[in-house]
Every structure is written in C-alpha cells, then in structure tokens.
Amino acid sequence: MKICRFKSLDRVAYGVVDGVTVTEIMGDPFGRYDMTSIRRHIDRVEILVPCQPPTFYAAGLNYLAHVTETAEARGEEPDVPEKPDIGYRAVNALIAHGETIVIPWDATEEVQYEGELVAVIGKKVKNVSEEEALDCVFGYTIGNDVSERSWQRSDRTMWRSKNSDTFKPMGPWIETKVNLRRMMTTVRINDEVVSEFPTNSMVFGIAEYISTMSRNITLYPGDVIWMGTDGATQNLKDGDVVEVEISGIGVLRNPVVREAASEEKSTEEGNE
Amino acid sequence: MKICRFKSLDRVAYGVVDGVTVTEIMGDPFGRYDMTSIRRHIDRVEILVPCQPPTFYAAGLNYLAHVTETAEARGEEPDVPEKPDIGYRAVNALIAHGETIVIPWDATEEVQYEGELVAVIGKKVKNVSEEEALDCVFGYTIGNDVSERSWQRSDRTMWRSKNSDTFKPMGPWIETKVNLRRMMTTVRINDEVVSEFPTNSMVFGIAEYISTMSRNITLYPGDVIWMGTDGATQNLKDGDVVEVEISGIGVLRNPVVREAASEEKSTEEGNE
C-alpha cells in the first residue's frame, strides 16, 4: 500500500494512493486510521514530504562501489566502515517530490545526486534484535541525498554540503510492502540513466542498522533512516531534472535550479 | 520572562514561571498567546523539555580552553575551528530537568558532562545579517551535552557518544531576557563546582553562528542551537547529581544512574 501526505484546498492530510487516485484517510497513518470517502486525482493534489521525522538518520557510506569510487576520485585509499555507525541529516533540507532543488549561488559545479532507499519507522522501539528489526519498519520511500562535494571536503561538519535548504528530496510516498531483494535503484538525469544498482546490496543491511541503533537509541514513529547510495555520482546543473526510481516504490522527480548571485550577495562575498 | 513546558493532570501546556508559580498560557509561545487564570505551584507540575526542536543544532568545539585541554588529554595538537561549521544532535536523547541520565551498561567510566548555553529560535529566518541575527532568538535555556569519550574516539559518527537516550538534558525553561556578557556557566557534581566559565567567551558568537547558518539553512521556531562548553570535563558516575547553572537563566539538575548489565545483555555481548 502507498501512503502519501498531501495538501488540497489548503488542508494537509494523509492518503492512500491507488493508481491515479488518492483516498484520504482519517487518523494516524502510523497508528489507527479509517479510510474516508474523499477521493482526488493525484494530479490535483500537492504531494508533500511523506512525514516530518522527529530524527533524520542517514547511513552515509554503505555500498562498496560508492566508498571505493569516491575515494578513487579523491586520490585516497577507500575507507570501508567497520560497523554501522549511523549519521544524521536535517529537517530544514527536506523537499517533496516535484519541488525544486536550489543550488546555492556560491556552490561549485560539484553538486551531486545520491539515490537512496529510506526506511520509515512505524513503532517506538528500543533494544530490538536483528531478527525482529524489520517489524518496526512502517514502509519505504526514496531519498536524494544531494551533496556539494567541495563543502563536504572543506567543512568540519556536513551542515551545508548535505543540509542546505532543498538538498534532501524525499518521497513521493511510503510503500508499506516491498521485496528488498528484488529492488533496483536507478538514477536518471534528463531521462538518461546515470546510476543503477541493486537496492539491497548494502555493506550493513537495514535490520543490522536498526538493531545496532536501538541498543542506545529509542526509535520513534516517523523517524527515517536513509540507507546510502552506490557508485560514483555526477554533477547536477541548472535546468536538469533528476529522478530516483526504486522498483516497487516509485519515482522521486525534482527539477534543479541554480540560484542567481544577487548584487548584494556578491558584494558581501567580495568584502569578506 | 521564563517560559516552561509542563505536564499536569496528564495534560501538556506552556506556562510562565514567576518564582514558584507557573501560570498556564493558551496559544503558541513562539507566536500569539494569552495568559490564563490557571496557576500551579512549580513543585506540583512535571517540567518537560521546553521545546521539541524540528532541528537540533550544536556548535561543538567553541571555547578555546575546551579545545586545548581536551586535545592535551588525548596527547594531540589542539585543532581550533576556523569557521562556524554547525553540527547536529538528536531529539531521542533529550530529557527534561529532573529526569535521570542513564549511563548504558556497556559504557566506559568516561561519561562526562558539558554545560552549554542553548539559543532557542523564535522566528523563521533565512539570510539574516550578523547585526540582526539575535532578533530571531526567542530566548535561552541550558543544555548538558553528556558524552561518552571512548565512543567519541572509536565511532565514525557521534551517534552513541553524544546521542544515546537521556544524554541531552535541556531546560528547565526558556528565559527570554538575558545579558549575554554578564552570564557565568557553572557545573556542579554533588554540589561541588567542577567547571566555571564566562558563558559568552565563545570562539564564534551566537550572532555569527546564526548569520552563517542562515545563508544556507532556514531556521524555524523551536530549533535549538547548543553553543558548546569550556574547559576539561570530568566523569559522571552512578548516584551523582549533576547541575548546570547559567546565571540569569536557572539551574538544570539531573541525577545519574548506571544501567545494570542484564544477564541476557552480557551473554549477547559475550557471544559477539
């Protein structure tokens, strides 16, 4: 089942997507809810980010080819993580399917996509075993972990490289039933495939991450865990349209625009 | 004015603290609200974390003596940040004034306090100048950035060293009027002063952080920015009571308990 969050006539609601129809639900999608009789065409509603995570987790380096190829690009030795140490991203950066990725005026050309599977937590859990870990997953959605590589190298944290406004497209909806072993992640820029990999070929799987995290951390409904990406990535530029498709979930599509350097901003920069 | 969030008779509300009296308010403390006639003695309500931040920011290394003394303790060269690159903490770890800091059963002895000033954002802002930056601050509260130092050294991220459940006491309330230049931060363990420093003697001030962050990031009401701590820090142990006092705001007090290693947990560990 596909659960989306949407806006229609200035009202925000959750709905169940079936083909081109969104049926509004009443109640808590992570808890108890009822279907209503309100139906809308999906093109007539504004799709929103599927949930506002209390905490926004990200695995970072979690596919071998991504670790080795990005290290190669930097002329460094690959540093494959030895254990699932989870990282963080920030809520300010989230945008929905269809919204615009804005490249800041002072970013370099190295603003790149990263197509990622996102696990959405559905239950409050602590100390869950690896065997039972997937039971607390409500469903899966798609993320694009947009990254400015020069800032990623120069800054002490990943605050602007990974978390500038609009750098975290997530959606279009949450699919509650998937077959992890059969899924493929495909990234396209302007309809051309630039990246493709089996979604589940992770260094540390979702169950291992959740079980390890839950030893120290309580997970809450709506928390999201972005699982990382594979392979080398390419630059996004003004006018591009970037799509991340994961088979069994759907397509997350976002246009890209580069922010114009206003005179005021350029002058400020010149004065630094 | 002191604004607190509290629970009374299973109901959560915001209130204004005056001496020992909490007067409930109706509406949004960050927006429009009215005082009600409901008053309670502060000892008769349960003080909660003063807000649930959409994004939880932390400056990290932001006082000279902390950078130099902690580097010394590790036998390393001090690495003073060259610019205000903001970091992140996680909402799962927040606890209120009076709640218990739980040291995980598998933590080392090196679980340490860090007394910090916390700026609470009151307005949605982007691209704010340093001169105008403090206008978006709603008020200030107190944080204790509890840290397990061995995990801080061994892990790729600070997920469990800084964000294990209960590792982020924050409160007791938000003070809307402070004189930053006159404030002192004092940390006490079991009534003994273990750390004391002028609160505002930061490497990068609050206005500089907010202005820099807001170039790339939209800040939202309720976002919190933990400003870092000064000096070397000491271990907390089972049975301790740790207090962080910042003059002009109040005292954040939390007892400390070490989690017992259950047989099951020890066995699991033994099997690894």
Image (cartoon, coloured by chain):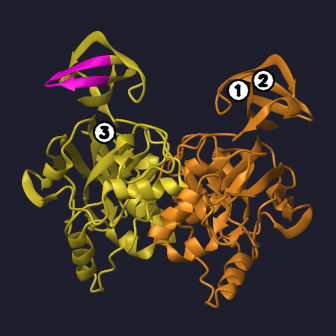
Chain colours: A orange, B yellow
Task: Tell me: B11 left or right of A98.
Answer: left
Dots 3 and 1 on the same chain: no
At label 2, the amino acid type is: Glu
* Magenta segment boundaries in residue numbering: B15-24
Q: Can you identify the residue that label 2 sits on?
A: A24
Which labelled disc corresponds to residue A13? 1
In this orientation, which residue lies closer to the viewer: A9 or A177?
Answer: A9
In percent of width and height, residue B211 lies at: 42, 55
Count neighbours of disc 3 (C-alpha within 10 A) and say few if under 14, some if 14 to 19, many if 20 or more.
many
Task: Tell me: B246 left or right of A7.
Answer: left
Circle 3 marks a residue in which chain?
A: B
Quadrant assignment for the N terminus of chain B = top left
At label 3, the amino acid type is: Gly
In percent of width and height, residue A214 lies at: 52, 54
In this orientation, which residue lies closer to the viewer: B259 or A113?
Answer: A113
Q: Can you identify the residue that label 3 sits on?
A: B139
Q: How far apart are the alpha carbons under marks 2 and 1? A: 7 Å
Which tag, 2 or 1, sits closer to the chain's start? Answer: 1
In this orientation, which residue lies closer to the viewer: A115 or B175?
Answer: B175
Please indicate, yes or no, whether residue B26 appears anywhere in the rendered image.
no
In percent of width and height, residue A6 lies at: 74, 32
Magenta segment includes B18: yes
Circle 1 marks a residue in which chain?
A: A
Which quadrant of the figure has residue B198? bottom left
